[in-house]
Amino acid sequence: MNLKDYIRSIPDYPKKGILFRDITTLIKNEKAFKETIDQIIERSKKFNFSKIAAIESRGFVFASAVSYILKKPFVMLRKKNKLPADVYSVDFELEYGTATIEIHKDSIDENENVLIIDDLIATGGTAEAAAQLIEISKGKVEAFIFVINLFDLGGTDKLLKKDYKVESLIEFPGH
């Protein structure tokens, strides 16, 4: 199954000049969604991790299913002011603005290996911020798995230069 066939491209969203890769068309198809989860699980087998973290919100869709199947705890990396207990915060740049993500301070144990899952990597700002949150929590980033890599926007290269392991299921140009 070619998962690319299930990704809708929307020009000029969320602002002019951005070609948005929409995963809703993938997750609404039960066979494509199952294939996506199966591929993430297969790729995760090469890594040693005890927890799965995901970036709000589309990363939650994939990571929660993988967490359930692999019987691994799931950690949510959320937008600012969405977590009720004490948090660590990291500010970062997006392709189309700035943002903050947070993690509960008690989510990760010291030296715990964490697999980070998200729907898409573009410039890498969100992924870098997620890694910083894991590391501030005294955990270790075992690897990243993305459903989509916008390869010409440099995010994967940025992570690889920092010696992170990166896997992607689908490759698209960014614009």
Image (cartoon, rainbow, N blue to C red):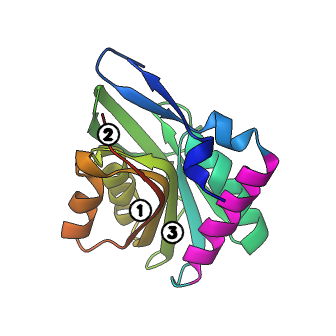
Between disc 2 and disc 1, the foreground one is 2
Please rate how many residues cluster around mark 1, counting C-alpha atoms within 10 Å: few if below 14, some from 14 to 19, many from 20.
Answer: many
Q: Specify the segment rendered in magenta.
A: 30-45
Quarter of the figure that contains the N terminus: bottom right
Q: Secondary structure at mark 1?
A: helix
Q: Residue furthest left?
A: 161
Q: Which residue is mark 2?
A: 174
Going by the image, does 39 lie left or right of 137?
A: right
Amino acid on which disc 3 is placed: Leu
Q: Which mark is residue 115?
A: 3
Name the residue at 18% across, 68% down. Answer: 161
Q: Is residue 156 above or below residue 16?
A: below
> Residue type at mark 1?
Ile
Near-viewer residue (162 or 43) = 43
Badges 3 and 2: C-beta atoms under 8 Å apart? no
Report the disc number at residue 134.
Answer: 1
Task: Report the residue at 54% width, 79% height from top.
Answer: 49
Distance in Å between CA atoms under marks 3 and 2: 24 Å
Q: Residue at x 81, y 48 (%)?
A: 30
Name the secondary structure under disc 3.
strand
Q: Nearer the viewer, mark 1 or mark 3?
A: 3
Viewport quadrant of the C terminus: top left
**Percent of width and height locating residue 166:** 38, 68
Q: Which of disc 2 and disc 3 is earlier in sequence?
A: 3
Is the residue 113 above or below the residue 76 in the image?
A: below
Q: Nearer the viewer, residue 112 or 84?
A: 112
Left or right: 167 with respect to 99?
right
> Eyeballing the image, is 115 above or below 78?
below
44 left or right of 35 in image = left
